[in-house]
C-alpha cells in the first residue's frame, strides 16, 4: 500500500522575531526535523513555516492543490486563531492539531526564549476553539513527539486521512444482490453523498466475455505461480485449476479496466447465467490478496468497508462473517463460503487450494483457498446503515486464536476471541445493529476507525 501524504502546517506569529532575533529560523529547523521524523509514516509536504494569515492561507491552498490526504497543524509558539478562519473554511482535507513541545521537561535553566518556544499549548487551545465554532472536525494530540503514543496517533491519522481521501474517488462494482437480505441494502445515493464513493451496477456477462479474451499463456503463468503459493489437492485437475485462474484474471482485468477499487459479487448470478461451471472463490480471494475490497452477496457497503480495511491494515484484511460461538475456546468462529485473503495465512502452514464440495446454483466444485490467519491481535468491523442516511462503525478488538483444527471446515476460517468476551460481543453486536458481514484486520486498528468516523461524521461504536 502506498504511503499517505500529509501537509505540515507549522505556525508561529512573525512578531516574535524582533524580540528574539533568529527565532523563525530556529523554529523552521525544528519543523523540518519534525517533518523528517514523520516521514517514517507518511510522505510529508513542508516548505516553510507560516507566520501570518496570508502564509497560512497560502499553505493550506497548496496542500489542497497537491492533493494531500490530510493536514497536521502544529503550534511552534503562539499563533492567532483568527488567521485560520478563511483557510479552514476553504480547506477540504482532514485535520489534526498536535501540541508538541521541543522540550518535554521544564528546567531551572530555562530562559524567556525557552519558555516562548514551548508555549504552543495555549495557541492550540485558541485555534481549537475556532475549529469547534466553525464546526470543523479534527483529531487532537498533546504529548511528546518522541513517544510511541504520538507515533501511533500520527500513523492512524495519516491512514485515516488516506482512507477519507480514497473514498472520494472510490468506485465499487456491484454484480447482483441477494434478495431480502436486509442488512446489505442501503440508500446508494445517500451513501455516495455521505462518503463520496460511486456504486456502479455491472453485469456478469462482462466477466464471461473477458474470460474468453485471457491468453492461455497468462493462465499458465498464473497457475505456475499458484503452485508455489498453495499446496494444491491432488484431486484437482489442471483444467479445473486453469478455469478458476481464468476467472481471476478476467475479474482482475474487469477491475482494472473499470477503475474499480472494490467488488461485490452475488454468486447466484453465475448459476442463473448458465455459462459458468464453478463459483469464483479463488478469484475473489486473490482479488483481496491484491488489495481490492471484496464482499459477497451484493453487499456494497461491506465491499467499501473492506477497501478501507485494506488501508487500515496495510493489506492485512479479509472479508468474513460471524458463524458460530465456541464456548471451549471462548471465541467466535468466523468464515464465509470460500473467500478469504490468503496473504494473511499463518506463516507456519502453507495455504491449500482444495477441490471444495460446494454446489450452490447447481454448479460444480470450485477450487477454494483453505487457511487460517496468523494468530495475534485483530479487529473486527461492521459498516451498518441505520436508516435516515445515518451510518455506524461497529468495532470489536480481540485476538485471532491459535486454533486451526477444524478438519471438516472447507473454507478459510478463524477463531476470534473478543477482549470483551465472546458472549458479550455477540449480544452487543445485536444491540448496536452490527451487520452479519464484517472486515477483519490484523492488529489493533480501533483508533483508525474512530478517527475515520469523526472525519465522515458517522457513529463509532466500540464493543
Image (spheres, rainbow, N blue to C red):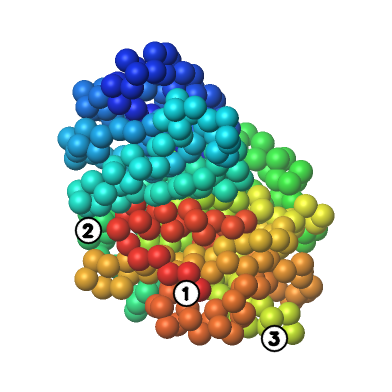
Quadrant in the picture for residue 178: bottom left
Q: Indicate whether 11 appears above or below 196.
A: above
Query: Which label number is shown at residue 436?
Result: 1
Q: Secondary structure at mark 2?
A: helix
Element under disc 3: loop
Work out whether residue 77 or residue 135 is closer to the camera in this orientation and state it: 77
* Marks 3 and 1 in Cβ contact (< 8 Å): no
Residue 327 bears which disc, if any?
A: 3
Q: CA distance from mark 2 to mark 1?
A: 22 Å
Asked whether 229 or 400 is in front, the reply is: 400
Q: Which residue is mark 2?
A: 189
Q: Residue at x 66, y 66 (%)?
A: 399
Front disc: 2 or 3? 3
User: Mark 1 Cα within 10 Å, few/some/many (few <14, many 20+)?
Assistant: some
The answer to which quarter of the image holds residue 68 is: top left
Badge 2 vs badge 3, beta-carbon distance below 8 Å = no
In the rendered structure, the answer to whether residue 236 lies left or right of residue 13 reads right
Amino acid at each position: 500500500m502506498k504511503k499517505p501524504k500529509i501537509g505540515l502546517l507549522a505556525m508561529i506569529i512573525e512578531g516574535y522575531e524582533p524580540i528574539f532575533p533568529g527565532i523563525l529560523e530556529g523554529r523552521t529547523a525544528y519543523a523540518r526535523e519534525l517533518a523528517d521524523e514523520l516521514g517514517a509514516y507518511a510522505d510529508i509536504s513542508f516548505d516553510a513555516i507560516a507566520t501570518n494569515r496570508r502564509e497560512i492561507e497560502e499553505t493550506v491552498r497548496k496542500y489542497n492543490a497537491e492533493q494531500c490526504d490530510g493536514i497536521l497543524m502544529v503550534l511552534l509558539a503562539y499563533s492567532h486563531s483568527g488567521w485560520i478562519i478563511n483557510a479552514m473554511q476553504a480547506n477540504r482535507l482532514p485535520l489534526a492539531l498536535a501540541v508538541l513541545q521541543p522540550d518535554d521537561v521544564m528546567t531551572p535553566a530555562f530562559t524567556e526564549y525557552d519558555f516562548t518556544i514551548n508555549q504552543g499549548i495555549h495557541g492550540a487551545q485558541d485555534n481549537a476553539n475556532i475549529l469547534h465554532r466553525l464546526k470543523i472536525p479534527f483529531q487532537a494530540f498533546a504529548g511528546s513527539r518522541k513517544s510511541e503514543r504520538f507515533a501511533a496517533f500520527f500513523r492512524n491519522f495519516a491512514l485515516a486521512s488516506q482512507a477519507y481521501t480514497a473514498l472520494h474517488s472510490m468506485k465499487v462494482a456491484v454484480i447482483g444482490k441477494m434478495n431480502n437480505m436486509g442488512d446489505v441494502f442501503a440508500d446508494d445515493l445517500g451513501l455516495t453523498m455521505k462518503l463520496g464513493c460511486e456504486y456502479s451496477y455491472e453485469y456478469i456477462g462482462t466477466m464471461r466475455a473477458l474470460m474468453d479474451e485471457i491468453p492461455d499463456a497468462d493462465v499458465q503463468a498464473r497457475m505456475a505461480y499458484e503452485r508455489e503459493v498453495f499446496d494444491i489437492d491432488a484431486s484437482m485437475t489442471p483444467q479445473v485449476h486453469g478455469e478458476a485462474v481464468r476467472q481471476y484474471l478476467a475479474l482482475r482485468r474487469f477491475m482494472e479496466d473499470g477503475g474499480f477499487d472494490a467488488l461485490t459479487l452475488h454468486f447466484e448470478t453465475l448459476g442463473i447465467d448458465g455459462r459458468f461451471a464453478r463459483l469464483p472463490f479463488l478469484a475473489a480471494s486473490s482479488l483481496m490478496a491484491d488489495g481490492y475490497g471484496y464482499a459477497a452477496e451484493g453487499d456494497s457497503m461491506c465491499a467499501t468497508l473492506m477497501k478501507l480495511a485494506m488501508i487500515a491494515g496495510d493489506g492485512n484484511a479479509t472479508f468474513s462473517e460471524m458463524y458460530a460461538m465456541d464456548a471451549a475456546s471462548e471465541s467466535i468462529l468466523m468464515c464465509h463460503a470460500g473467500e478469504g485473503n490468503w496473504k494473511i495465512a499463518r506463516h507456519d502452514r502453507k495455504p491449500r487450494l482444495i477441490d471444495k464440495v460446494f454446489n450452490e446454483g447447481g454448479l460444480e466444485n470450485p477450487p477454494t483457498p483453505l487457511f487460517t490467519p496468523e494468530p495475534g491481535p485483530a479487529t473486527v468491523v461492521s459498516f451498518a446503515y441505520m436508516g435516515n442516511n445515518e451510518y455506524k462503525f461497529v468495532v470489536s478488538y480481540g485476538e485471532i486464536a491459535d486454533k486451526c483444527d477444524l478438519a471438516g471446515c472447507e473454507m478459510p476460517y478463524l477463531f476470534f476471541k473478543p477482549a470483551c468476551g465472546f458472549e458479550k460481543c455477540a449480544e452487543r453486536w445485536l444491540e448496536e445493529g452490527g451487520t452479519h458481514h464484517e472486515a477483519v484486520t490484523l492488529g489493533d486498528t480501533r483508533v483508525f476507525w474512530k478517527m475515520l468516523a469523526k472525519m465522515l461524521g458517522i457513529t463509532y461504536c466500540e464493543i
